Amino acid sequence: MTNETMIGITDVEKHYGSFRALGPVSAEIAAGEFFSLLGPSGCGKTTLLRLIGGFDDPTSGAIMISGMSMAGLPPNKRPTNMVFQSYAIFPHLNVAENVAYGLKRMRLGREEESRRVDAALAQVELTGLGPRMGDQLSGGQRQRVALARALVMRPKVLLLDEPLSALDKKLREQMQVELRHLQRQIGITFVLVTHDQYEALGMSDRIAVMFAGRIAQIASPREIYQNPASRQVADFLGGMNFMTCRDFRTQGAEYSALLPGLGTIAGKLDNGRGIDPDNATIGIRPERLRIVWDGETADPKIVGKVIDRHYYGEITNLLVSIEGQENPVSVVETNDFGADDIPVGSSITLTHDRDAFVVMEG
Amino acid sequence: MKFQGTLGDTHQDGKAGGQGRTAPPTIQAALRTETGKGWLTISPPLLYAFLLLIGPILVIFANSFWTQDYLTIDRTFTLANYKAALSEPIYRDLLLRSLQVSVSVSIVTVVLAFPVAWFVSFRGGRYKGLWLFIITVPFWSGYLLRILSWKVILGYNGVINTGLLHLGIISEPLDTLLYNTTAVIITLAHSWAAFAILPLFVSLEKIDRTLLEAAADLGDGPVRRFMRITLPLAMPGIIAALMIVMIPTVGDYVTPKLVGGKDGVMIANAIQVQFGKAANWPLGAALAVSTMVIVAVVSGAMVLLLLGFRRLMK
């Protein structure tokens, strides 16, 4: 991945009448980056993708692609191609004709055209399916045809609008891996819209988390998961125990807080992001809380009581109430030590690493 | 369907004392299947469609092979009627003119109706229902009334002539507006407009708008998008609209009578005369059957032509 900017989004807003669907948002997406727009439905992620693709015009703000302003340019004049959520396979054309659709206008000649179509079909592992009609394909095949049809145009940016949401879980996971491989192999910029946190975490170089038309945080998957900027981001990506907290203080880049039932904790505030002490929440991810088994030594030791247990195969989620804390904390343990055998109602001792807590807004 | 059939069979087996699975299904068992239920549901309309549609056609067909013998009908088989219908210049001319008029009317109607249907479907927004309602408003008045109003518009002292006189574009009224084939085509095209707009609208409505976005994404401007996506996908509607307009207009005899003059007479007028004043049912029947067959052939040719065009648009 180079650091050259491929897509520059500056103060972009989109209004529908008096309703502001998006913005203002700003972001820079690097060339060759796999960038995801993640958020709940209605957060404006698809709106932003459509603005990049040229299917809608921003109410204000500017979008640059590869250093050129996209203002007023229709989709057919942009160096982008889109994989639509519904795939939009032309039903009256067969697979090869679908893939060749955009090439026809270039007048490449029959040989070059069919060579490119075959290469694109091979890329998405659909070799030999060319003569099949567009309306006789399975969901996974439609997805691949849509991908081939866009990639054959050799765009600078590939836009993907929830491309995997219509597939069943197994196929979706397989396609996640394939999409990631494909992106690395051809090296162009991918912008993916998804509401699936695991999809975004597993595939992206960077993620923009969006709520209510705004970007809440842009960072790498690890950074977003381990250091969410706000309570909302933390809550949307995976589980987070939000702790009852007293006496939160900051001094420079350090903070300290009293968590009833857990004692006083102290640590470093995350780099670069200041925090308003009156609007701060402390949290810990469920997997960062560990069970202290009999005979183990640990520091600190937190005593709690198991009030509920959920079994998920490879992991167990225990709900543990701690005296002084308003909400029970959720603890995730893998089942290799027998967390699934801990009876509801029993007392339990928990521990955590000193740096396991996260300070965030909200 | 298969599952239901199997259920019926097992039931049968039980009754027959389990003698084997090959027992033939009874009528009751057949009626219990999905297909059987389907036939049962449509049987009343099917029955009267057969009686009222197929019956008269059979009568016409039979008559066309008989001979009118003054007041009685000679029921010996003859092809003389067909010979007359197809070889006498007057009938040949009328048939050709009818075909020419109906094909022109259907093409003119569809060409004029398509933009209307496109507008309602693509630009109608939430007023689609209102637009469709407005389109049907002219059809609240009678068919004859609409034809007569075209007489008022196209006539010697009609709206167009007086208007042009007033503007000084012409010095005396044109007598070429009314009582000819063009007047028939104009009147019929107007009469059938709504019947063309509706199937076109339905087929345009069914087009997934994302397909047009995908075409734009793949580099097509508005014109290419229309030619490569909208038109081919609207083809079933175009064919339906052409057929709906063309087939009945061949047989129209009221419009040519009122606005066609002597040059606008069509085959249906001749058929009407044979069944009425001339009292020669067999010849009228032969003319009717010939017209039917030729219209079927011409429609089939048009459908093939359009499907070929659609294949070309790829």
Image (cartoon, rainbow, N blue to C red):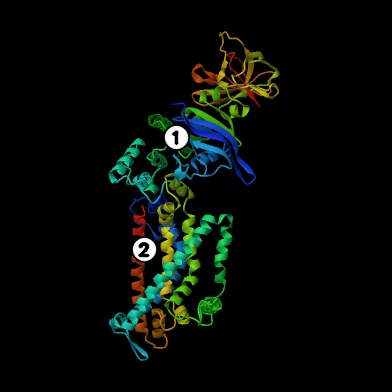
Helix, strand, or loop for circle 2?
Answer: helix
Question: Is B277 in front, or is B109?
Answer: B109
Quarter of the figure that contains the C terminus of chain A: top right
| Chain assignment, label 1 | A
Name the residue located 56 percent from the left edge and 70 percent from the top edge.
Answer: B138
Q: Compared to A248, does B291 lie above or below?
A: below
| Residue lying farthest to the bottom in this orientation | B70
Q: Give the Cα separation between the discs numbered 1 and 2.
A: 43 Å
| Few, some or many residues within 10 Å of mark 1 (<14, 14–19, 20+) | some
Q: Position of residue A246 (x, y in %)?
A: 71, 18
Residue A146: assigned label: none
Question: In front: mark 1 or mark 2?
Answer: 2
Image location of residue B80, percent across then percent down:
28, 83
- Binning the other alpha carbons within 10 Å of mark 2 as few (below 14), some (14 to 19) or many (20 upward) gives some
Residue B126 shown left or right of residue A66 in the figure: right
Q: Is residue B14 left or right of residue B65?
A: right
Q: Which mark is residue A172?
A: 1
Chain letter for mark 2: B
Front-most of residues A64 and B67: A64
**Residue A260 is drawn in which quadrant?**
top right
Q: Residue at x 58, y 26 (%)?
A: A239
Q: Give me the residue at 35% from left, 58% from top.
A: B309
Q: Residue B81: percent from the left, percent from the top?
A: 31, 83
Question: Which element carries disc 1, helix, strand or loop?
Answer: helix
The image shows residue A215 at horizontal and vertical percentages of: 58, 32
- Count of marks placed on residues: 2
Q: Quadrant of the N terminus of chain A?
A: top left
Q: Is residue A199 visible?
A: no
Q: Is residue B104 visible?
A: yes
Give the amino acid type for the residue marked by disc 1 in the picture.
Arg
Residue corresponding to mark 2? B303
